[in-house]
Amino acid sequence: MKEGSRGGIDLVFLVFPASVILSVTASMTRYSTLIAFMCPCGPNYTSVYPREPEPMKELRELTAKHPWNLMTTSADEGQFLNMLLKLINAKNTMEIGVYTGYSLLATALALPEDGKILAMDINRENYELGLPVIQKAGLEHKIDFREGPAMPVLDQMIEDKYHGSFDFIFVDADKDNYINYHKRLIELVKVGGLIGYDNTLWNGSVVAPPDAPMRKYVRYYRDFVLELNKALAVDPRIEICMLPVGDGITLCRRIK
Ligand SMILES: C[S@@+](CC[C@H](N)C(=O)[O-])C[C@H]1O[C@@H](n2cnc3c(N)ncnc32)[C@H](O)[C@@H]1O
């Protein structure tokens, strides 16, 4: 085992041979849910899983049976988001990219009773898969789910002058649109509020040489993620902090 490695990575080192580890990049924690299920040491290996709230555990286990489960937010990132939202006393939030709702649930659990999440996804079916868990936890009233692409909703909010109204926005959807989302979200988040862009390490591909072997979809979105990372690094309207949690999350704090 590699001492000091992060989240699900520990589990990878315990189970897979070196050749597989090399093909699985350092940012593989996104797949920690899957790995936790395959690992004989079980999901109690890190301090993340024993602390996971019961509804999040239930949703994670339910999601693990879904064919697209690799899309889900990892347990360590869910724990991070939950803590972050409490630290900033977030009340009005937005999420782009819900899938079965793991990060949504982490958010809903952190918000006060009158907190709100505007949640958008093109796929309602997956949201409805996790919805019973959210309902059982008594959190549905915090969620305003909109089925469809996020961009038109954002454009409408700009038109309706919702400027500066969000404490926190989590973006975990179509990577080729992150730059376009940023143009709108920077107006919609309040000064002092946060936008979190997920997958900014993009399976570690952002630090790999361009000719390194990569899966087709990783290569395709890599350029968009690189473009976003460069744009955020020079954007004077924000302070940024890029964290190697999950597949990498870049926090942007609006300062003007
Ligand atoms: C990586 S998953 C989100 C994972 C989720 N945050 C979680 O915790 O499980 C990405 C989601 O973005 C959604 N998506 C893709 N394009 C979108 C768009 N244009 N607008 C809104 N959602 C979109 C997909 O349907 C998918 O459910």
Image (spheres, rainbow, N blue to C red):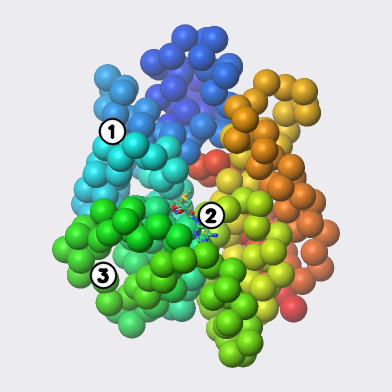
Q: Position of residue 33 (x, y in %)?
A: 36, 36
Q: Which residue is mark 2?
A: 173
Residue sitting at 48 percent across and 35 percent down? 29
Tell me: residue 46, above or below residue 107.
above
Tell me: residue 178, above or below residue 89.
above
What's the amino acid at mark 3? Answer: Leu
Residue at the left extreme?
136
Separation of residues labelled 1 and 3 (CA atoms):
26 Å
Pointer 1 local density, CA inside 10 Å: few below 14, some 14–19, many at least 20: few
- Quadrant housing residue 139: bottom left
Tell me the tag on residue 70: none
**In the image, 115: left or right of 203?**
left
Whether the residue carrying mark 2 lies under 8 Å from ligand 1 is answered with yes
Q: Position of residue 194 (x, y in %)?
A: 59, 68
Q: Quadrant of the N terminus?
A: top left
**In the image, 99: left or right of 218?**
left
What's the amino acid at mark 1? Answer: Asn
Separation of residues labelled 3 and 2 (CA atoms):
22 Å
- Quadrant housing residue 155: bottom right
**In the image, 126: left or right of 159?**
left
Nearer to us: label 3 or label 2: 2
Tell me the tag on residue 44: 1
Tell me the tag on residue 139: 3
Residue sitting at 50 percent across and 42 percent down? 246
Nearer to us: label 1 or label 3: 3
Q: Position of residue 36 (x, y in %)?
A: 33, 30
Sequence-first tag of 1 and 2? 1
Residue sitting at 73 percent across and 53 percent down? 228
Q: Are marks 1 and 2 in contact (CB under 8 Å)?
A: no
Identify which residue, 52 or 144, lies in the foreground: 144
